[in-house]
Image (cartoon, helix red, strand yellow):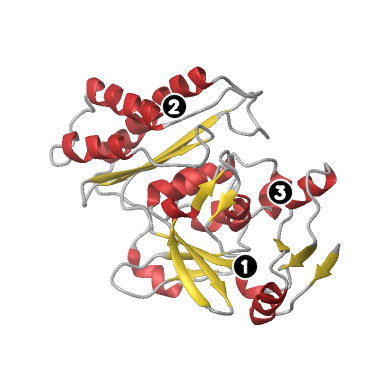
Amino acid sequence: MDFLRPATWEEALAMKAARPDATPIQGGTDVMVEINLDKGRPAALLDLNPVAELARWSWTAGPAPMLRVGAAVTYARLIAELGGWLPGLAQASRTVGSPQIRNRGTLAGNLGAASPAGDGHPPLLASGALVEAESVRGTRLIPIAEFYTGVKRNALEADELIRAVRVPPAAGPQHFCKVGTRNAMVIAVCSFAVALDVRARRAGTGIGSAAPTPRRAYAAEELLASELDWDGGGALDPALAGEFGERVAAAASPIDDVRGRADYRRHALAVMARRALGWAWADHIASPGGAGPGTERRNEETG
């Protein structure tokens, strides 16, 4: 196995162009497990750790700034530095592995592995994130819902690397929940995220570990957009919450496996969706229009 170690991003792109069979490695929390268990042996490893810029985050310019999270930003830093702007993603990050994994693992690594059970996927889907992919040919932004193409497959071309993930800051309450076979350090049996944008009167959803790829529940989103009492801010209608849960479950296509049965996954998704919506709506009532830290600091901060 060849080991490639670029010092700069430009070198990394050149090496990936020359060796499209090279597997990028940053935290290594997915790649090394596969190698150690003899489930896969790449022809080459492309070590991105020396590329300092990948460990930074910043705000994009324009009328609707987004958080640009570098490919090497770890889960621990997402929690500590970006949780106020990205609460759903921070909640999901807290469920990832152990403290050691959270200090090494990265969101971009989660995307590259494209496992249906990855904890970062549902909140990214619910938020409408963009994956910034780059090669020597140029840069493109891939909408997150188009990024997953199959079980552990993604939309990256052979010569492309993930440079960053662009995530809109929360425009309202967000929640993530997950069912596992134990309380910590567990692969999700199924997971769910919801994000409310109260001003725009829309909702985003994300389903994990209940289909060949992470996916949104579009019919459930349409239900909330048309039926939630966006103006009044009254109590959540239990019938609406129940219908929302059923639509989320209907959007899944789970399988039976060693972690859980398909019927259980559908049931759990309906329950989680109903509860997550209830928590999000309660947050909205408690703090109408609240969406995390103010925007006045955005252009001053970087990681």
Give, as a three-letter code, the residue at label 2.
Leu
Q: Secondary structure at mark 2?
A: helix
Q: Residue at coordinates 65% horizontally, 32% vertically from top-left?
A: 184
> Earlier along the polypeptide chain: callout 3 or callout 2?
3
Residue 167 in the image, given as x and y percentages of width and height: 43, 59
How far apart marks 1 and 3 lie (CA) works out to 18 Å
Give the left or right position of residue 257, taking residue 194 as reference: right
How far apart marks 3 and 2 lie (CA) works out to 26 Å
Give, as a three-letter code, the residue at label 3.
Asp
> Earlier along the polypeptide chain: callout 1 or callout 2?
1
The mark found on residue 190 in the picture is: none
* Residue occupying the far left of the picture: 232
Q: Residue at coordinates 41% horizontally, 22% vertically from top-left?
A: 271
Q: Residues within 10 Å of mark 1 (few under 14, many from 20)?
A: some
Determine the image quadrant of residue 163. Answer: bottom right
Q: Secondary structure at mark 3?
A: loop
Residue 141 in the image, given as x and y percentages of width and height: 44, 67
Q: Secondary structure at mark 1?
A: helix
Quarter of the rendering occupied by the C terminus: bottom right
Give, as a three-letter code, the residue at label 1.
Ala
Residue 232 in the image, given as x and y percentages of width and height: 13, 37
Tell me the residue that label 3 is attached to.
30
Q: Residue at coordinates 39% horizontally, 65% vertically from top-left?
A: 66
Tell me the residue that label 2 is attached to.
269
The mark found on residue 55 in the picture is: 1
